Amino acid sequence: MTGLLAREWFAERDLRHMSATARVDVVDRRQGQTFRFGAYVTHTHHDGRDGPPSSLPDATRYGLRGAWPWDDGDMRRGLRGKLEYRDYVHQDARDAGFASVDLDWSRPLSDRTRLSWGGGVEHMRPALSYQRYWGANAHMGVTRQVTDTTRLGATARLALRRYDHDFASVDYARTDEIFKLGLSASNSQIRVAGAVPKLTCSHTEHRSNIALYQTRYTDCGVTFSFDS
């Protein structure tokens, strides 16, 4: 069982929000491989001090997920899948089903360094036809055990999305390109209530042929996970 509570703080009050997640997984470990299947629910609540409730993207996500990582010598492979329903509290038109499948690989570059890469496909089907899309993504990352207790990581990710129908008020469909770079750091000697905090920072460039969806932002945060 896993619980996660997160707080994201932005200069713009309407973007500030909290999210809470509860997950239950069944895990079957065998020689060189692990099977994992579970269910989860996540609720996100925005502060919304400067706008009407209808402007808030508060939502609850219900989902099933599965994973099958296995070893082949030094190489590790992993197949992951997810089925999810997104229920928006104030914006019913955004309610949607979502599905994704990803395949990952990783291998050591040295005793303390590991390289990972992979990709996947996804599909989202909301009520609004021009917001339905198929997407593909690719990623690469490296982690380094700098000392016996300190771990650093860096990742790069590219995602492409192609939407099904012409966007509202224009005669062409939306296309998006999303670039993301991330860094992470943790030290196992630092513990808070038994959990090791992990510091992460990422920068995202979201490009779109619909100017409304073009954006860039940088996120930094500390994550505490409590597993049992």
Image (cartoon, rainbow, N blue to C red):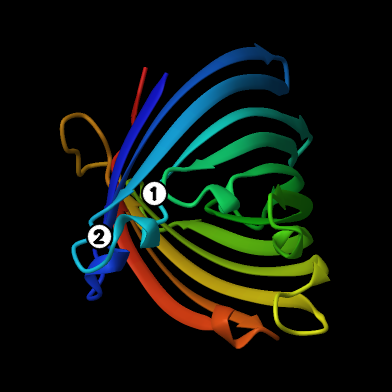
**Residue 3 position (above or below residue 210):** above
State the residue in front, 86 or 50.
50
- Indicate the quadrant where residue 16 lies: bottom left
Q: Is residue 225 visible?
A: no
Using the image as rendered, state which of residue 90 and residue 123 is in the foreground. 90
Please state which amino acid type lies under the numbered disc 2: Gly
Mark with earlier residue (1, 2)? 2
Work out how far the residue at label 1 is from the one at label 2, CA to CA, in angstroms: 10 Å
The image position of residue 135, as x and y in percent, is 77, 60
What's the amino acid at mark 1? Answer: Asp
- Residue 164 in which image quadrant: bottom right
- Residue where numbered disc 2 is placed: 48
Give the residue at mark 1: 58
Query: Does dot 1 land on a helix, a strand or a loop?
Result: loop
Locate the N terminus and report the quarter of the image it occupies: top left
Q: Position of residue 107 (x, y in %)?
A: 70, 49
Circles 1 and 2 in contact, beta carbons < 8 Å = yes
Eyeballing the image, is 200 above or below 122? Answer: below
In front of the other: 169 or 15 = 169
From the top left corner, tell me how far across and down residue 77 is, in percent. Answer: 76, 40
